[in-house]
Image (cartoon, rainbow, N blue to C red):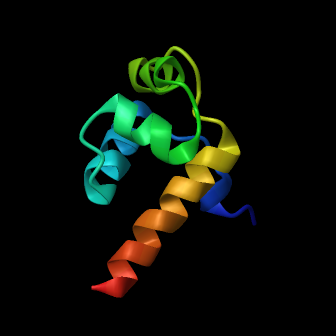
Amino acid sequence: MEDPRLNSMAPDELRSCMRSLGYRTQNDLARAIGVSRSAVSLWLEGKVGVPRPIAMLLRMLVAAQRRAY
């Protein structure tokens, strides 16, 4: 069975992750994960899929944050 953390990420899930992790702007997220703001914009518009490694990283960060509190 495939690990669901490896799936791509829909724009709504990306927005939700951004909020959970405290990134208010596309620029904040882009700087934090080392990509361009335009890449984040394309992901949020659904024009380009979120790369699987980035989707996995964001899901792991959200899960780790939930365990910390």
Quarter of the picture holding the N terminus: bottom right
> In the rendered view, would you say 65 is above or below 35?
below
Q: Residue at x 50, y 55 (%)?
A: 58
The location of residue 69, given as percent across then percent down, is 27, 85
The location of residue 28, given as percent across then percent down, is 36, 39
- Asked if residue 61 lies left or right of residue 56, the reply is left
Q: Residue at x 34, y 47 (%)?
A: 18
- Which is nearer the eye, 17 or 39? 39
The location of residue 3, given as percent across then percent down, is 68, 64
Residue farthest toward the right in the current orientation of the protein: 1
> In the rendered view, would you say 67 is above or below 21?
below
- Asked if residue 56 lies left or right of residue 63, the reply is right
> In the rendered view, would you say 40 is above or below 66?
above
- Which is nearer the eye, 35 or 13? 35
- Asked if residue 58 lies left or right of residue 2, the reply is left
- Asked if residue 65 lies left or right of residue 48, the reply is left
> In the rendered view, would you say 69 is above or below 14?
below
Quadrant of the image occupied by residue 27: top left
The location of residue 53, given as percent across then percent down, is 69, 48
Quadrant of the image occupied by residue 29: top left
Q: Residue at x 40, y 25 (%)?
A: 44
